[in-house]
Image: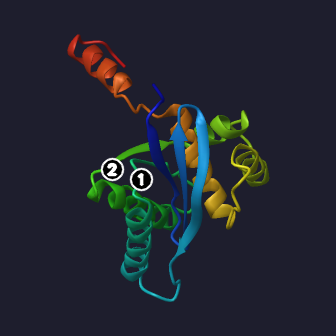
């Protein structure tokens, strides 16, 4: 019996560009399906920029119909306003698949880097190089798409598709274990 095929979307949030990457996973085999970035117009007010991201990502999800989604978590930097705007773009990335009842996982940037390159401190060039090695048939649109494909690859490697991990966590919590 062959393993079920799953379509995964990885999302790399950004207010100017939000990257997206789609892979199919069957067993341990990954197949590149598509990638790109949704752009928002910096001349527009924030609410309209978020709407552009929402509309663009919704079109991607509608076209490719993923089964599972993953979003990179936001890291906090010294510029609080920029971090807040990034968080709002990230919220769009969480809402678009959730609105279509697609499960969404979240991964820290260092976890994504380690999952794809073996190092939690890899730079963007190393990530893109490894993504290209793992998905040799992919023509990667830009750095945002490369990062999004890395998120999708991380989901393929670390995703709890059967729900076993979540069930174990719930069992431990009911027994009063500290997690």
Position in image of residue 59 (x %, y %): 41, 71
Determine which of the numbered discs, if any, sits on residue 66 in the image.
1
Position in image of residue 96 (x %, y %): 35, 61
Which sits in the foreground, 124 or 86?
124
Q: Secondary structure at mark 1?
A: loop
Query: On the picture, is 8 further left or further right than 133?
Result: left
Position in image of residue 175 (x %, y %): 23, 10
Q: Residue at x 47, y 30 (%)?
A: 3
> Disc 2 vs disc 1: which is toward the camera?
1
Residue at the outermost front position:
1
* First in residue order: circle 2 vs circle 1: 1
Which sits in the foreground, 148 or 43?
148
Determine which of the numbered discs, if any, sits on residue 15 in the image.
none
Q: Which quarter of the figure is the N terminus placed in? A: top left
Question: Is residue 78 visible to the viewer in this orientation of the structure?
Answer: no
Q: Secondary structure at mark 2?
A: loop
Image coloring type: rainbow
Q: Residue at x 30, y 54 (%)?
A: 98
Q: Residue at x 46, y 40 (%)?
A: 5
Mark 2 sits on what residue?
102
Q: Residue at x 75, y 45 (%)?
A: 130
Q: Is residue 55 above or below residue 92?
A: below
Query: On the picture, is 3 further left or further right than 104?
Result: right
Graded by Cα atoms within 10 Å as few (under 14), some (14 to 19) or many (20 or more), the crowding at tag 1 reads: many
The total number of labels drawn is 2
Instruction: Verify CB contact (< 8 Å) between mark 2 and mark 1.
Output: yes
């Amino acid at each position: 019996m062959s393993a079920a095929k799953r379509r995964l979307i990885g999302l790399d949030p950004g207010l100017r560009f939000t990257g997206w990457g789609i892979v199919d996973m069957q067993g341990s085999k990954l197949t590149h399906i598509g990638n790109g970035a949704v752009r928002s117009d910096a001349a527009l007010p924030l609410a309209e920029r978020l709407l552009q991201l929402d509309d663009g990502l919704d079109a991607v999800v509608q076209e490719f119909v993923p089964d599972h989604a993953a979003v990179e978590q936001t890291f906090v930097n010294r510029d609080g306003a920029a971090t807040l705007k990034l968080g709002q773009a990230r919220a769009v990335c969480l809402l678009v698949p959730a609105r279509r009842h697609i499960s969404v996982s979240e991964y820290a940037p260092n976890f994504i880097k380690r999952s794809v390159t073996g190092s939690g401190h890899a730079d963007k060039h190393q990530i893109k190089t490894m993504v290209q090695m793992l998905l040799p048939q992919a023509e990667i649109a830009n750095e945002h798409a490369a990062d999004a494909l890395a998120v999708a690859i991380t989901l393929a490697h670390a995703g709890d598709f059967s729900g076993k991990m979540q069930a174990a966590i719930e069992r431990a919590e009911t027994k009063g274990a500290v997690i």
